[in-house]
Image: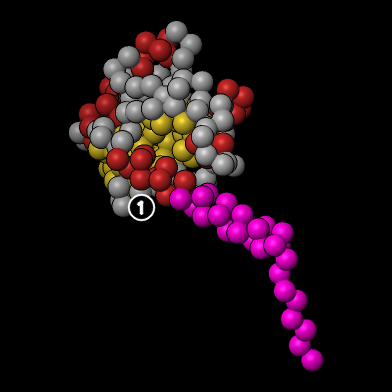
């Protein structure tokens, strides 16, 4: 025997609210991704087979800092559109960082000066041009060199410092003061006779704000 139970007005309202909230989260996530892709007007670079483009209007803030200073937005779910301390809004999270759009010219030429004054950028924000997913660019390069013992020479030629040198295979990881300097050094390193490949270090894994 099948028993049919009519939904009460309260139950119907709860269902409608749940569906509306779910739709809002999905829409906010899609809107945030679209806004980030649209803002990706900076330099292009490659890492392996993937191509990326920098987002000059986005910044990577430590998650605790962004959460502590976030202000409620006008939507139902404040975290999805929260405004961080710098005036932007959190559009995603990667690792321990919040991606803040319109939080300042993170990829601008004054980044090195901000780093020296204590406003270390840490990571640049980029977008994977194939998937549309956001990524963080670290101040490090992975250099694959065919000759052993060239790590220090490569560091000196590029203005970086050796963080790791392993052989074989000859993998050298070079560190730089800022991600901008790492990206700027990549082309020069590719022209070194022993270098087979240079890859900027990229962190890429997307999760919507909670």
Relative height, residue 65 to residue 45 (above, below):
above
Label 1 packing within 10 angstroms: few (<14), some (14-19), many (20+): few
Relative height, residue 137 to residue 118 (above, below):
below
Foreground: 169 or 19?
19
Q: Secondary structure at mark 1?
A: loop
Q: Residue at x 36, y 15 (%)?
A: 112
Which residue sits furthest bottom? 1
Q: What residue did someone put label 1 on?
A: 131
Relative height, residue 81 to residue 68 (above, below):
below
Relative height, residue 21 to residue 203 (above, below):
below
Foreground: 77 or 47?
77
- The chief SS type of the magenta part is helix
Residue 168, given in percent of the width and then of the height, sits at: 42, 44
Q: Residue at x 36, y 52 (%)?
A: 131
Foreground: 102 or 43?
102
Quick check: 1 left or right of 48? Answer: right
Q: Is residue 179 magenta?
A: no
Q: Residue at x 42, y 9 (%)?
A: 116
Quadrant of the rendered image containing residue 182 = top left
Q: Is residue 24 magenta?
A: yes
Residue 70 visible in the current orientation: yes
Which quadrant, please, contains the N terminus? bottom right
Quick check: 141 left or right of 190? Answer: right
Task: Give the residues drawn in magenta, as a range.
Answer: 1-27
């Amino acid at each position: 025997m099948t028993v049919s139970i009519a939904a009460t007005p309260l139950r119907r309202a709860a269902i409608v609210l749940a569906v509306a909230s779910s739709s809002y989260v999905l829409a906010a996530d899609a809107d945030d991704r679209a806004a980030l892709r649209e803002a990706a007007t900076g330099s292009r670079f490659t890492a392996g087979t993937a191509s990326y483009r920098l987002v000059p209007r986005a910044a990577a803030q430590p998650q605790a800092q962004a959460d502590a200073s976030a202000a409620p937005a006008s939507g139902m779910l404040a975290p999805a559109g929260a405004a961080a301390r710098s005036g932007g809004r959190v559009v995603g999270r990667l690792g321990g960082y919040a991606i803040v759009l319109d939080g300042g010219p993170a990829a601008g030429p004054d980044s090195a000066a901000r780093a020296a004054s204590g406003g270390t950028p840490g990571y640049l924000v980029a977008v994977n041009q194939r998937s549309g997913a956001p990524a963080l660019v670290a101040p490090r390069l992975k250099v694959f060199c065919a000759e052993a013992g060239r790590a220090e020479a490569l560091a000196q030629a590029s203005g970086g410092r050796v963080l790791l040198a392993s052989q074989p295979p000859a993998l050298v990881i070079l560190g730089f003061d800022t991600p901008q300097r790492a990206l700027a050094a990549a082309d020069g390193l590719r022209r070194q006779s022993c270098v087979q490949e240079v890859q900027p270090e990229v962190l890429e894994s997307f999760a919507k704000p909670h």
